[in-house]
Amino acid sequence: MKVTRALLPLLPLCQRLLPTRLAGLSLTLLKATALEIAILAGHFVLYPSGITPERRRSPIPTRSLADLPDPDLGTDGTADTARLPTPDKPPVVLLHGFIDNRSVFVLLRRSLAQHGRQQIESLNYSPLTCDIRAAAELLGRHIEEICERTGRRQVDIVGHSLGGLIARYYVQRLGGDVRVRTLVTLGTPHAGTRVVPLMNAHPIIRQMRPGSGVLEELREPAPHCRTRFVSFWSDLDQLMDPLETACIEHPDLLAQNVRVSGIGHLALPVHPAVAAGIREALDVEEETARATAHTGGLTVA
């Protein structure tokens, strides 16, 4: 990556001062830190463009199953084994993290659109939000409106950091599993994070601490939850303490945890390798998902 070229002269020094393994780790950390700084700078540039809600585009008309041609018949009415039905993909809802807005998903949105997702919506919640429960209720109203407007029964959600926690609360505690087929979370503190204790004055930060009332509610049984969960967590995430807090560990949930190596917290919704992993998670069939191991790995360093 171009942002790391300036760090390459430091590699010989690292190799002399540190053992080989630690030197490699240090270089990876330097690369990840440089990338985080570059993304943060881009964030400041794009942030104003995401303050206002996005314009709602008219959905592409969908036809009922009765109106669709039989995929097993050719144009002349005879059997055609070469033609296969095109999968009908639900809308994707993108939900940003704390003190952020929809601009964080510019690259991910483009990636999803280029790979067949025709209905993508980025939602903003107020930066003054002080309660995950209230934000989850608002998310539920948005999703009902999206389903009504698009004529779809379900959506997929991708939530970054706090956005993933809001979406999970909606799914688990407010009956959102009826509407959400797959929930992908990126660097979300599912078990609570202890980073930056000085920010405890903010009520929503307190709700993201281990043992908070919200997180205890999410630990309660959810035997009939129908949503599939995929959680991406990074071994260099500066905002997760401990790192594994971004994993979903719940006996009643169909959850897959994907470890990402080599990037930090801000890069999760931006990095092309993570975007590819998100697309794969959204496109996998339910039967395949249930047969998939509950852990996985993704190296982007």
Image (cartoon, helix red, strand yellow):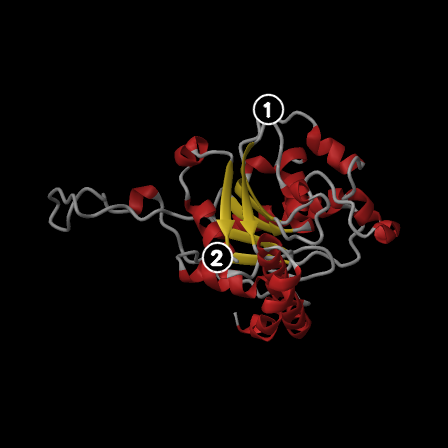
Quarter-wise, where is residue 79 in the image? top left
Q: Is residue 297 above or below residue 43?
A: above
Q: In the structure shown, which secondary structural element does the residue marked by tag 1 occupy?
A: loop
Q: Indicate the amino acid at tag 2.
A: Ala
Residue 7 location, x and y as percent? 61, 71
Residue 34 location, x and y as percent? 63, 67
Quarter-wise, where is residue 100 in the image? bottom right
Along the line of sight, which residue is nearer the eye, 273 or 201? 273
Q: Residues within 10 Å of mark 1 (few under 14, many from 20)?
A: few
Instruction: Please say whether residue 46 is visible from this viewpoint.
Output: yes
In the displayed structure, does residue 205 sit left or right of residue 246?
right
Q: Residues within 10 Å of mark 2 (few under 14, many from 20)?
A: some
Residue 204 circle label: none
Q: Is residue 7 above or below residue 109?
A: below
Q: Give the residue at mark 1.
A: 223
Q: Is residue 199 above or below residue 289?
A: below
Query: CB of mark 2 within 8 Å of CB of mark 1?
Result: no
Q: In the structure shown, which secondary structural element does the residue marked by tag 2 occupy?
A: helix
| Label 2 – label 1 distance at C-alpha | 33 Å
Residue at 53 percent of width and 73 percent of height: 2
Nearer-N-terminus badge (2/1): 1
Indicate which label's residue lies in the foreground, 2 or 1: 2
Residue 273 circle label: 2
Instruction: Please say whether residue 57 is visible from this viewpoint.
Output: no
Residue at 59 percent of width and 73 percent of height: 9
Residue 71 location, x and y as percent? 23, 44
Residue 272 location, x and y as percent? 49, 60
Q: Indicate the amino acid at tag 1.
A: Pro
In the displayed structure, does residue 85 sit left or right of residue 257?
left
- Name the residue at the front extreme: 16
